[in-house]
Image (cartoon, coloured by chain):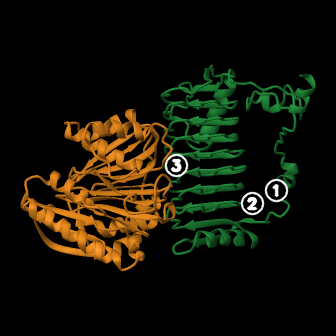
Chain colours: A green, B orange
Amino acid sequence: MAGVKSSRSHDMGMHTEQLSGRAMQLFFNAEEEGGFTYADAFEVDFNKRAEIDAEGVSVHDINLRIRKLMQEGYGTIVLKNPGARHSLCAGILNRLNLIIEGSLGYFGCGLIDGPNVRISGRVGWSFAENMMAGVCVIEKNAGSTFGAALRGGDLVCKGSVGSRTGIDMKGGTILIGGDTGAFSGFMMQRGRMVVCGNAGKNLGDSMYDGTIYVGGEIQSLGVDAVPEEMSDLDREWLKRKLSMYELLPKDGSVDHFTKIVAGRQLWNYDNLEPTEKKLIL
Amino acid sequence: MCGIAGIIHRNRTSDIGTEMTSMLRSLKHRGPDSTGFAIYGKPAAEDDVHVLRFKVAEQEDLDKGSHIYELIAKRRAEVEESMNKFGIKMEKIEEPTPYAVRCYIRGGKDLEKLARRIEEIEGVEILSLGRALELVKDLGDADVVSEQYDLGGFQGTHGIGHTRMATESDVDIRSAHPYWAFPYHDISVVHNGQITNYWIMRRELERKKHRFLSNCDSELLAVYTAHNLENGVSLEDSMRRSIEEIDGVFTYLIATKDQLGMAKDTMAAKPMVLYENDDFVALASEEIAIRSVVPHEIDTTDPYDEEVRVWQA
């Protein structure tokens, strides 16, 4: 895909930068499903359901039990009484319906690739950090650095989130039903963030690319983050995505959203490798 | 990293000692070096009765041979002599450790002078002096310190606490949190973060005749607040002002005899989770600390950058 000036992802408005070098894009194809799972992923049956009561069980053992249940073919796991503990449900690289009845602490669902996670409570700092694919839906609030370095998938918080949401995100979609704190989208590189409520100061500071949509007020824009007019494609995408997670306003309108993109005044890159630069200089 | 926590009950008292111990136990992983409690009990009916907690040595001094016990006795005698000179009577004296003393003091007109005199005695440090505040801090985790100082069952309206990971200063009691605003009664602070204009602010306050007992940047917040309160600024306004005037990354809790306040700096880089209901407010660096006193599903929020909140007991 190197050197493509206009690709399918450009046409879909997912990003605008020209990919080059080792950048690679892959699009899901149902017929090639096998190519999108890990070689050692477990075969699971979504109709096979198990429950884990986390009360009194160590975080390490809970994570191991989830893995063991997947190994045994359980495709739906319900985790009860997580008690806001840290690092739960991290590193799941499998298709899985994971239902969490309660709240998670810090670093919940980090480094995941593929599961469909539903959380009835709230989550602490750095939820779904480095998430590669799948869906996570949180019914209540979330802490800071929500979806840091997100690579793919849909990350949804129906309440409000803390500061630095989607810091360094490189793909995927973050949807927030309420407000987000300061420095959200800081150094964003790709992907989309939708904030239905208000955004704190320095939104999109030093963003390289990607798009942020804000339904409420923006306290201030960060360096090199600029507003851009919404296109029909943006509106269509927003309506579709918000309705998927029951976040679309009752009147069905998304006209009140403001679109923020990179101003690209901070960009100072070229396509030359350091060795090539030496040759020229 | 450090962990901070606080709880305040609305119009009632509770077993603050046990609650704060639970919360700080849950935050042990954020700082194992020392643990501190600032808990606020019901003031005595008489206006001239205060609670005094002081130490006459560091915990580590006890390993330095039997000579330290002679020094401890000498320092204790000097404290009592000072009290007598100021016409102050010590009552209900307790010694939770060989180097820490808790007592009630009755009488005396100038407690500030007394405090300064006691602090002049080598090796002696006042941990707290107030109508409601009792400040306990020592090396070890929450359970160790709480048990050592018999905090379980302590009835009070509110408290703040700290588990410390030493980064800026030594691992000793002097550098442990909470700090009180010497010699202003009943003001204590716990802090997670780093104040980068500490020395500028400290010198400014020292020029205004304030005294610092440690080199820990967190003490600045206590002295800064005490200075503002002394000059008629409300606690909430003082905390708002601190966000403008103090540089660095910080989230701090501050308590007075009947209030608990929270402030978060402009970068919101240090965590804080907040839970409120009709009966009490609990805050902590991590939700698990709140869960230790509210063991069921709750709705919590993360205060935003530059947010200041103050609650009344």
Figure check: A87 above or below B206: below
Residue A63 pos. (x, y %): 65, 68
- The kind of residue tagged 2 is Asn
Q: Which residue is mark 3?
A: A142
Q: Nearer the viewer, mark 1 or mark 3?
A: 3
Which residue is at the far right?
A: A279
Which numbered circle lies on residue B73?
Answer: none
The chain identifier of the residue carrying mark 1 reads A
Mark 1: few, some, or many residues within 10 Å (few <14, many ≥20)? some
Which picture quadrant has residue A64?
bottom right
Q: CA distance from mark 2 to mark 3?
A: 24 Å
Amino acid, disc 1: Thr
Q: Amino acid at mark 3?
A: Ala
Quarter of the picture holding the C terminus of chain A = top right
Q: Determine which residue is flagged by label 1.
A: A37
Left or right: B4 as drawn, with respect to A197: left
Q: Residue at x 55, y 71 (%)?
A: A54
Height in image: A161 above or below B135? above
Q: Earlier in the sequence, mark 2 or mark 1?
A: 1
Q: Quadrant of the N terminus of chain A?
A: top right
Between discs 1 and 3, the one toward the N terminus: 1
Report whether mark 1 lies on the same chain as mark 3.
yes
State the CA–CA distance, disc 1 to disc 3.
29 Å
Task: Locate residue B168 relative to residue A77 in the image: left or right.
Answer: left
Q: Mark 2 = which residue?
A: A94
A9 vs B210: above or below: above
Q: Nearer the viewer, residue B119 or A51?
A: B119
Q: Position of residue A32 (x, y in %)?
A: 88, 50
**Along the polypeptide, which appears first: circle 2 or circle 3?**
2
